[in-house]
Image: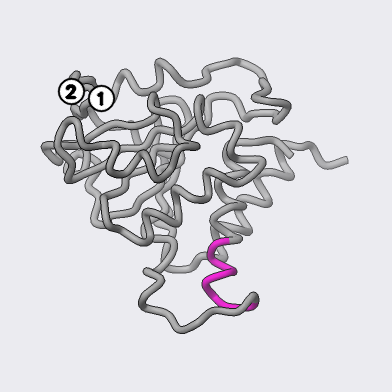
Amino acid sequence: MRSPWLAGVIAFGWAISAMVGSALAQGPEPLPDFNIMTPGGAVTSSANLTGSLRGANSITVDDGVPVRPHQWLLVYVRPNCAACDKILNVFHEKPISPLVANNVVVIVGDLKVGSVNLVSKRFPWVPDSSWFLDTLNDAFKKLTLQSDSVILGMRESTIQWKLVGPLPAADNRKEQNHNSPHDADLKNLKAIVASWLAVK
């Protein structure tokens, strides 16, 4: 019988391979050292990001959803970015939504201290403790990012994969139907996030 872990890996592989041109395949690399700020203006290091996240040695549960140990997501977004909004909206979906508080960090670029609510208030399902500011673009530079919307698949303090700009801006597409490429991309994005965080 196929184990839940193997089934999740297979599902993750299928979903991420379906998003051709979005995923950047790479070997594991350590999370670099960079400074970011809390919404209140306190400076913190990237080394502290895993401290508040789940680090159990065995599968644990959030609101009845089995969670993959040591795995979490680091999401980089910017204001007024349609692709970024698509990513943040995915975190409102089940079975993902119960996992956000302990397993997702969102870094927002191009915002001053005290203005994170311009973004966070539109996505109330992402808790305050998950938001950080990249006011000096330190994270953007150290992570060598080249897109406004990026998801990093993390295992403890190691970057396992990157997903860059998974969804095109809505205003660049014609009216969509349920069989459109846009719908397929959104479905695959949900599958990637859910498979990385949760055991089905």
**Is label 2 in a helix, a strand or a loop?**
loop
Q: Which residues are magenta?
A: 179-186
Q: State the quadrant of the C terminus.
A: top right
Q: Is residue 47 left or right of residue 70?
A: left
x 39%, y 24%: residue:
129
State yes or no: residue 185 in magenta.
yes
Tag 1: Cα neighbours inside 10 Å, few (<14), some, or many (≥20)? some
Q: Are marks 1 and 2 in contact (CB under 8 Å)?
A: yes
Q: Is residue 48 left or right of residue 191?
A: left
x 45%, y 25%: residue:
156
x 64%, y 78%: residue:
179
When the figure is inspected, residue 7 is found, relative to residue 71, above or below; the finding is below
When the figure is inspected, residue 185 is found, relative to residue 164, above or below; the finding is below
Residue at the left extreme?
136
Residue highlighted by disc 2: 41
Residue highlighted by disc 1: 38
* Residue 34 picture quarter: top left
